[in-house]
Amino acid sequence: MKLPFSDYSIGAGIATDLVNTSALVRRSTGEVLVDPAALGRFLGEHRIPVEAAAAGSHPSEADLEQVLALRRELRALLESDSADQLAEGANALVRKAGVGPLLARDTDGHWQWYVSTGPRTPLADELAALIGTGLLGVLRTLSHDRVRHCASPECDGMFVDTSKAGRRRYCMPDLCGNRLNVARHRARRLADAAEADDA
């Protein structure tokens, strides 16, 4: 398999989404990756270009256990204090399956750098290489400051901000951002109601 090296946002986005599948983050809904079928849905929803997904095979129980172990390792990596720690950990992720850089033409005929993986590489290791490549791209192109904790006080999620402006605040904007906006709206309505009762 070949993983594009220049589009770091793919791997960084998958890193964010994978870390935020845990029950630690999703307190109200619980664990997302509850079984191999759920892992298969995660891979499909994210169009993750790993050999097992491309071949149409389904993830196994062993794949699920390895991906959950990768998720724990990734969470610790995202919580690292320095750019050096992030680089070291991301390089280790790439080495799990990466066999070196490869220069090849993309579908449009342009030259593109890829990280290639060996044949029969386990699903979790291919995912690690994709995520590691994305994190290295973010570190080099943006900075370690783009790895953040969710701004919602009710969330323990983390994310990698690959937005152009770099102002993202929530791990899952549709969920955490909306939840906070609804809470603020309710608080304003209660304050307005209390003010009206006092008048």
Image: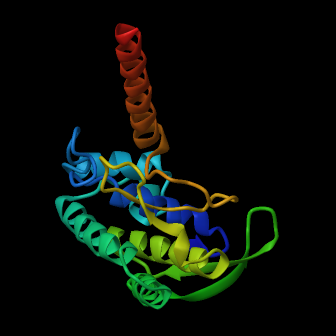
Q: Residue at x 42, y 32 (%)?
A: 184
Q: Give how far across and how far down residue 116 sits, in percent.
A: 54, 80
Residue 199 in the image: above or below residue 116: above
Camera-nearest residue between 101 and 167? 167
Camera-nearest residue between 157 and 49? 157
Q: Residue at x 51, y 75 (%)?
A: 135
Q: Is residue 155 left or right of residue 90?
A: left
Classify residue 126 by image quadrant. Answer: bottom left
Colour logic: rainbow
Can the viewer see residue 55?
no
Q: Is residue 30 left or right of residue 171?
A: left
Residue 59 in the image: above or below residue 140: above
Q: Is residue 87 left or right of residue 64?
A: right
Q: Give how far across and how far down residue 166 sits, in percent.
A: 63, 61
Q: Residue at x 46, y 60 (%)?
A: 14
Q: Give how far across and how far down residue 181 sits, in percent.
A: 46, 33
Residue 25 in the image: above or below residue 66: above
Classify residue 191 by image quadrant. Answer: top left
Residue 111 in the image: above or below residue 172: below
Q: Quadrant of the C terminus?
A: top left
Q: How many marks?
A: 0
Can the viewer see residue 156?
yes
Classify residue 159 by image quadrant. Answer: bottom left
Query: Farthest right residue?
Result: 109
Query: Farthest front residue?
Result: 199
Q: Give how far across and how far down residue 45 sits, in percent.
A: 45, 45
Q: Is residue 22 left or right of residue 195?
A: left
